[in-house]
Image (cartoon, grey):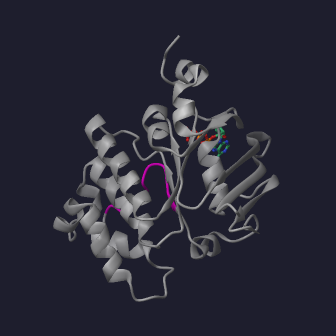
Amino acid sequence: MTALLEVRNLSVAYGAIEAVRDVSFSVEEGQIVSLIGSNGAGKTTTLRTISGLLRPKAGDILFEGKSIADAAAHEILEKGVSHCPEGRRLFGRMTVEENLHLGAYVRKDNGVAKDMERVYELFPVLGQRRNQKAGLFSGGEQQMLAIGRAMMSKPRLLMLDEPSMGLSPIMTQRIFDTISELQSQGTTILLVEQNALAALALSDRGYVVDLGRTTLEGPGHDLLADTRVRAAYLGED
Ligand code: ATP
């Protein structure tokens, strides 16, 4: 079976700084796959390269078996890869509804209104406050909106970069519950997280990234039980 996304021996550099070195992983349709690892490990760089915002120095990125390594960012989005960036990057002076519309700008079908209602079902608070400016929202609500906006392109693959960053434990749980819910509705998810425990608990597969390389991989539950993972990311001896 062809993986939905396959990253093969990917290397990415910022000038002389090699941020990603020979990283390989794949995401099967319907899965949640996480990349975990400490600050600066190269996870964000990997997502930005998949999205077409950065170019690989070496290696390839295949989406549905075809290389997207040279494609423009808008073409990759049109193929069905949506990126919910670290730090959310919302338009604070625009309303919830306007931010959601922006997420749908590549679509040519007429299902946008229906999908906006789906986002409001997933996150009722966004529906109640649809005419308010995004900049007035709490961190957790902004993360909901950022995920909602990314869903508005109707992605085959949703990439989430640090969705729990800066959120309270309750809000973090809410966001992880939503990620599971999106998977059960049929979305394939590539998740980048520093919260290794929560990410691996819901992942079909996980990859540990360290200094630009993948050092461990396996089913989420196996990695959660791995003493090396527990020592490095959960503070256990
Ligand atoms: P974080 O969770 O902090 O985003 P990360 O695992 O996503 O960490 P990256 O942001 O991909 O890691 O960074 C990987 C490496 O590349 C780090 O050493 C970082 O300092 C470096 N780096 C990231 N962005 C740039 C840039 N624009 N210019 C130069 N170096 C960069």
Is 233 within the magenta?
A: no
x and y percentages locating residue 50 in the rendered image? 65, 58
Query: Is residue 38 left or right of 121 when viewed as pictured?
Result: right
x and y percentages locating residue 67 in the rendered image? 76, 67
Please identify the dominant SS of the magenta region: loop
What stretch of residues is rendered in magenta?
83-92
Is 89 within the magenta?
A: yes
**Ligand 1 occupies quarter:** top right
The residue depicted at 31 percent of the width and 67 percent of the height is: 119
x and y percentages locating residue 14 in the rendered image? 73, 46
The residue depicted at 77 percent of the width and 55 percent of the height is: 56
Above or below residue 24? Residue 38 is: above
| Residue at the farthest left position | 128
The residue depicted at 49 percent of the width and 14 percent of the height is: 236
Specify the quadrant of the image occupied by residue 69.
Answer: bottom right
x and y percentages locating residue 166 in the rendered image? 36, 39
| Residue at the farthest front position | 1
| Residue at the farthest right position | 58
Above or below residue 189? Residue 107 is: below
Confirm whether residue 215 shows in the render.
yes
Above or below residue 191? Residue 147 is: below
Q: Nearer the viewer, residue 92 or 37?
A: 37
